Image (tube, grey):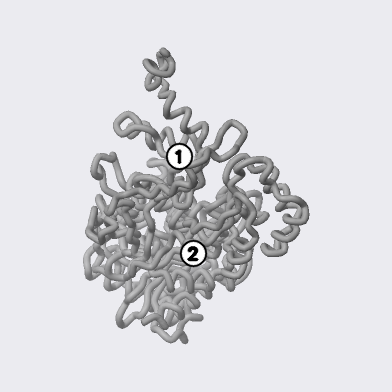
Amino acid sequence: GWIQVWAQRSFSERGVDLVEASVRQRERVLVLDTGRGPIVDRQGRPLTGRTVRALAYLPVARRALPDDAAVRRLAAILSADPERLARWFREAKGPVFWRDARGRLVALTARQERAVEAFGLPGLRVFSVAERYPEGGVARHVLGFLSQSPDLVRRLYEAREREDGPQPPMVGAAGLERAFDPFLQGVGPTTIAYFTDARGNVLSGLGLRVRVPDNPFYPLELVTTLDLPLQRALERIADRFPLRDGAIVVLDAKTAEVRAMVSRPTFDPRDPYAAGDAWRNRALMRTPPGSVFKIVVAAAALEEGVTTEEERFFCPGELGKYGFSCWKPGGHGHLTMAEGFAQSCNIVFAELAKRLGGKRMERYARALGVVGTVGWAEAPFFRFPRLAQFPEEEAGQVYARPEDSADEGVLVQTAIGQRDVRLTPLSAANLVVTLLNGGTPAAVRVATELRYQTGTSFAAFAKQRLPEAPGISPYTAYRLRKLMRGVVEEGTGKALAAHPWKLAGKSGTAQAVLGQRRVNHHWFVGFGSVQEPRYAVAVLVRGQPLEGENQATRLFGEVMEVLAAKK
């Protein structure tokens, strides 16, 4: 009497709800839709989720197991291995979906569905199921993935558990899924449930119950700045190139919004750790930028008045100390500062760095926003301590230690983007946007709004100035854009001169150690068209041989062909 009447809702000192526990023990549940909010591109086209018709087995009792003949007939309908299908039936402890050998949900054709329904096997049903990450999905590194890690759930939702009740079973572990997890969680899943006795027999009269969240407002929908057709086209370009390790970032030249972001190698969000660190977004990883950093040095030198574009220098090929040399054997000879930028002359930029000094050079890197992070962030956001749209973004740097800025040997290596200089492709692309917008840095957005299911706005993410980055003068920004045009017209980017658009940019080659190998990381950053800039682009091709042409320049050209053809 005490257990069944008096203590049924608060049994023992732990307050166990025996009624709820007994229902859970007898209930068998199949999740048709997690209820997680959709993520869409800037035109409302879905980036996550598709609905498929999937086969489910509801093991209502052991006597319902099909015999060998039935299994073979069903295997023929599904074009499946009979032995694996028989094992699927035998090992089912509860309701399960039929999946392929890689664990992916199998979508039935209309013909297969009709054949299964005519088959008439007890416990075999076809349901409409929402698949979060369909086969062939794009922008996987931007979207991220979900995790059932108890430690991650506990860390992200410790405060929420105290305030709102139990923790969610799945949380966003990377990308937008992680950044907006509290808002995408929804109000509950859509499920099919039935009840059995201790032997697995269905309790008569209860039948199958469909549970659908009854809320016209939730889950929230996340609207991104991505352009789905463009994202898909650039992923095809990357795979055909092939881009095995690297990134492509395309930003809107006026708004600093991400129109496309490609990272390779790719990964399966349903099993993200199977391919090592392939899930890590290369566009957000900091990497030595090589001569791309000369844009920052040139900005500082022009803004501070320590040189002009017409000043003449002499490059003998060697600085004469620190083992520092130009990339061109024998040197460039006599050339102007503008020619030194176009030809990426190391000696010219070592001389400019010595005139500037280490601290001034770093100050301009901060002013242009390449030190620290550039992604949109706000703190606090609603009742959450901080919202960062790129939670995995790594911070750029110029020096590893403050005292290094006074070391001339470090200084000249820093001037050419070596030593401890680190940039992300995202910050490099945003540096170009800064120059296109008169020298004023803006924070990069990849999401613009959270919406209720009714279409009304829940929260909007307004354009932001990049904090603690005052920028440079519009005149200096104009002079830098002109220097970048020279790179394509007569410098290291001359291979792009015949492009359908008139382009401008800066190449970079950074020596690095990757694992046990000495390699080059190839960069190209720039914009198009010169007459009417629409896009700022950064391309990084990692882990290239020490000899050979800059592969990022070629890939940049292919990316710009896609962008030029876009209406």
The one nearer the camera, 17 or 114, is 114
Going from N to C along the chain, the mark reached first, 2 or 1, is 2
- Total marks shown come to 2
Residue that badge 1 annotates: 169
Q: Position of residue 69 (x, y in %)?
A: 77, 56
Q: What residue is pinned by disc 2?
A: 138
- SS for tag 2? loop
Image x and y of residue 302, in percent: 29, 65
Closer mark to the observer between disc 2 and disc 1: 1
Kindly identify the amino acid type of the residue bearing the numbered disc 2. Answer: Val
**For this rendering, which residue is in front, 380 or 149?**
149
The amino acid marked with disc number 1 is Pro
User: What residue is drawn where x is 37% and y is 77%?
Assistant: 528
Left or right: residue 383 compared with residue 284: left
| Residue at (47% x, 75% y) in the render | 559
Q: Residue at x 48, y 55 (%)?
A: 281
Q: Quadrant of the C terminus?
A: bottom left
Which image quarter: residue 445? bottom left
How many C-alpha atoms fall within 10 Å of the one at disc 2: few (<14), some, or many (≥20)? many
Is mark 2 in CB contact (under 8 Å) with mark 1?
no
